[in-house]
């Protein structure tokens, strides 16, 4: 059958399957977890349903104890991989229609997970089905689709899969990013900093009773606050703080507390330069007052190493590369605890650098200044040359279907699944100019895009199957 005819014929079926999968709210739910359902009941049902339907289409399937599933076409040794995920993020109350009851309006399917990542998974499944039924998978080759189940939560799924699978695909793509193709993802380290809350002593010292800002390391904090022990009669101190327009001050007539607040601007940690860090604004405002606070040492060290910078300038770590861009540092959260100040931070670094370089260049300076550094998560950068046959074949498939020769493979600061498999890039499903809807309210998928991406995936797989 001709490809176009196949797509026309199967499109209604694909839409139905996407809708069917969206109705299973595959949100991480540890409360209902158990054997065979490590991420909760609904994710296990979603995986079971997907594998059953794939089995009915004639594919070989395997369930990896509820962590991930695989769907295989062909039996040859040379294996092309596709890696996507069946879990979705929660839906907020802001949706216009019920997120798990998909609706079609103006040629768009609305529902949680239609674009991230159930629609693309169904698209790839139908691309494989076409090649299988047309007997276009050469004898020595096979295509394996891997569906992970906690991509949004901790990516344990892919770690488990890698441990249990007999072998991994030779080269793969991840339909959970952008077209034309992402060949470069920055390295990333999530880390915590602890600074001992040794209290400054002396008659001039203003006790800081509370200090906090931010919600998590992946967002630039848009608000921060501290509570000082200052009596209403200490007019001079109050006046000095009031003279700083960055500080919003709440006085409490009856108490001895002064609440100071700062406002910043939220942004994603991968581009902190687009935000304004409320914690950094607060630290600077306190220091600018010329007063002495009980956490003076912490404030001074923060200012010395970080201040308002987001590119590691104060630590001489700033670096920039043509393809992957600049190193970025985000201080996402700070909090005064009983014995220490805790900071949650995230650094993303260009592709030619490595983990050890950051440890030497940045963490060493924090340690030397009295911070205790605890690494929480580290991901090496991903880089595949644009001249690599994998990139070239995928780009050709994209260009032939769309006629778009303008957009080139590019780099992102975010992290996709692609880092977890050998020789893998993220390829689609979002087309240039399309709005990023993953994790947003009213997530939708254009039916036209579903058809187009399937056509691209068919062509891409065919090219990858050629020796
Ligand atoms: Zn995703």
Image (spheres, grey):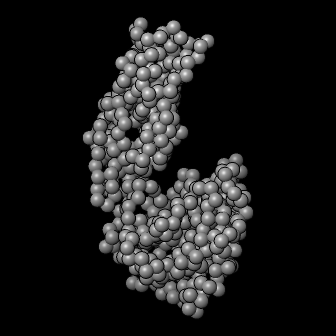
Which residue shows up at 58% across the image and 65% down it? 115
Of residues 161 and 360, the one drawn nearer to the viewer in this rendering? 360
Residue 401 pos. (x, y %): 47, 81
Which residue shows up at 55% across the image and 22% down it? 250
Image-based side of 462 in relation to 289, left or right:
right
User: Is the residue 249 above or below the residue 411 in the image?
Assistant: above
Point out the residue furthest to the left here.
316
Which residue shows up at 70% across the image and 65% down it? 102
Point out the residue furthest to the bottom here.
1
Total number of numbered labels?
0
Which residue shows up at 42% across the image and 42% down it? 330
For the C terminus, the quadrant is bottom left
Whether residue 62 is visible, yes or no, is no
For the N terminus, the quadrant is bottom right
Residue 420 pos. (x, y %): 46, 60
Residue 120 pos. (x, y %): 57, 70
Q: Residue 423: name its quadrant.
A: bottom left
Whether residue 74 is visible, yes or no, is yes
Of residues 446 and 202, the one drawn nearer to the viewer in this rendering? 446
Of residues 298 and 193, the one drawn nearer to the viewer in this rendering? 298
Residue 27 pos. (x, y %): 65, 55
Of residues 55 and 264, the one drawn nearer to the viewer in this rendering? 264
């Amino acid at each position: 059958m001709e490809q176009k005819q196949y797509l026309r014929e199967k499109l209604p079926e694909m839409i139905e399957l996407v809708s069917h999968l969206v109705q299973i709210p595959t949100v991480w739910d540890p409360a209902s977890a158990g054997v065979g359902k490590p991420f909760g009941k609904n994710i296990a049902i979603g995986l079971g349903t997907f594998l059953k339907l794939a089995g009915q289409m004639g594919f070989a399937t395997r369930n990896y104890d509820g962590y991930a599933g695989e769907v295989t076409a062909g039996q040859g040794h040379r294996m092309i991989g596709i890696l996507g995920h069946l879990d979705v993020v929660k839906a907020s109350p802001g949706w216009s229609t019920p997120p798990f009851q998909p609706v079609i309006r103006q040629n768009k399917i609305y529902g949680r997970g239609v674009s991230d990542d159930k629609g693309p998974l169904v698209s790839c499944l139908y691309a494989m089905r076409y090649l299988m039924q047309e007997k276009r998978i050469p004898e020595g080759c096979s295509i394996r689709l891997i569906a992970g189940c906690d991509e949004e939560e901790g990516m344990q799924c892919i770690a488990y899969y890698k441990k249990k699978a007999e072998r991994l695909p030779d080269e793969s793509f991840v339909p959970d990013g952008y077209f034309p193709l992402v060949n470069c993802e920055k390295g990333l380290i999530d880390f915590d900093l602890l600074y001992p809350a040794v209290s400054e002593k002396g008659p001039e010292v203003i006790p800081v009773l509370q200090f906090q800002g931010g919600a998590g390391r992946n967002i630039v904090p848009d608000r921060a606050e501290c509570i000082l022990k200052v009596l209403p009669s200490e007019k001079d101190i109050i006046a000095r703080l009031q003279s700083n327009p960055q500080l919003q001050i709440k006085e409490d007539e009856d108490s001895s507390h002064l609440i100071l607040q700062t406002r910043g601007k939220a942004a994603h940690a991968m581009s902190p330069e687009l935000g304004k860090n409320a914690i950094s604004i607060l630290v600077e405002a306190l220091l600018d007052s010329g007063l002495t606070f009980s956490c003076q040492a912490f404030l001074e060290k923060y200012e010395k190493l970080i201040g308002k910078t987001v590119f590691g300038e104060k630590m001489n770590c700033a670096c920039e590369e043509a393809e992957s861009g600049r190193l970025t540092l985000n201080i996402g959260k700070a909090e005064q605890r009983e014995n220490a100040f805790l900071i949650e931070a995230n650094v993303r670094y260009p592709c030619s650098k490595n983990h050890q370089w950051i440890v030497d260049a940045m963490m060493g300076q924090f340690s030397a200044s009295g911070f205790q550094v605890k690494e929480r998560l580290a991901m090496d950068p991903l880089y595949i040359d644009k001249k690599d046959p994998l990139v070239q074949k995928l780009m050709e498939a994209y260009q032939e279907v769309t006629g778009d020769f303008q957009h080139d493979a590019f780099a992102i600061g975010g992290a996709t699944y692609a880092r977890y498999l050998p020789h893998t890039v993220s390829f689609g499903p979002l087309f240039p100019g399309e709005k990023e809807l993953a994790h947003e309210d009213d997530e939708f998928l254009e039916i036209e895009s579903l058809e187009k991406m399937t056509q691209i995936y068919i062509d891409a797989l065919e090219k990858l199957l050629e020796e």
